[in-house]
Amino acid sequence: EIVLTQSPATLSLSPGERATLSCRASQSVSSYLAWYQQKPGQAPRLLIYDASNRATGIPARFSGSGSGTDFTLTISSLEPEDFAVYYCQQRSNWPDTFGQGTKLEIK
Amino acid sequence: QVQLQESGPGLVKPSETLSLTCTVSGGSISSYYWSWIRQPPGKGLEWIGYIYYSGSTNYNPSLKSRVTISVDTSKNQFSLKLSSVTAADTAVYYCARMLRFYDSSGYYYVRWFDPWGQGTLVTVSS
């Protein structure tokens, strides 16, 4: 089973700042990585798939990059609604696995 | 716009079977794959398995011996049964739809999931 390690566990930033979240895989997942956003009491929402493709309706301030074992989710300029928990997911090997999440909180 | 809604008992006794249903509205359950995912309180997400509308399934090996996912196309629903539950099965259970794309060869499916239901908390306790 592929282990995904997300860092940092918590990221404290202010609106308007740039956020950089990391996801590292225990073995190569090629580009088979996605990012989800989860707000308190809500279901996860797909943001990025195949490492760098934005899902339908996702604002352009969200971008993803990376391949192999190292991936990054970047939010170019934080909006108040972006403060949430972010999870990465791989689908290279079944069972698909998720990272433990990065909580993006308001500083 | 497709919406998913989980339903079922919020409390299950240890050793019994957890049963949940996901109702799909705003679209047909046909020609898609559907999944169950769970999230223990304060922890990360874990795949349970998925099912095609025709009934073919794939389960997480760690749960395979206890899981059954089924589909009822006439009701636009799919269901989860998890047997012999323990406190470790206490979690918010989500249902979700697999992404479907189209190219010159027709439809193909990719194990990214969206949308998801709101989730339902199931507590295992006597």
Image: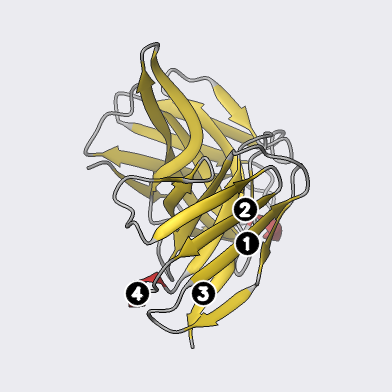
First reached walking from the N terminus: tag 2 or tag 1: 1
Q: Is residue A100 above or below residue B94?
A: below
Amino acid on which disc 2 is placed? Phe
Percent coordinates x, y for residue B100 in the rendering? 39, 29
Location of mark 2 (residue): A71
First reached walking from the N terminus: tag 2 or tag 3: 2
What residue is drawn where x is 65% and y is 41%?
Answer: B83
Nearest the viewer among A60 and B51 is A60
Q: Give the alpha-carbon distance from disc 3 to disc 1, as whole Å.
A: 12 Å
Q: Are marks 2 and 4 on the same chain?
A: yes
Disc 3 is placed on an element classified as strand
Location of mark 4 (residue): A79
- Eye-nearest disc, 4 or 3: 4
- Eye-nearest disc, 3 or 1: 1
Q: Give the alpha-carbon distance from disc 2 to disc 4, as whole Å.
A: 22 Å
Location of mark 1 (residue): A22
Amino acid on which disc 1 is placed? Ser
Location of mark 3 (residue): A104
Amino acid on which disc 3 is placed? Leu
What residue is drawn where x is 40% and y is 63%?
Answer: A42
First reached walking from the N terminus: tag 1 or tag 4: 1
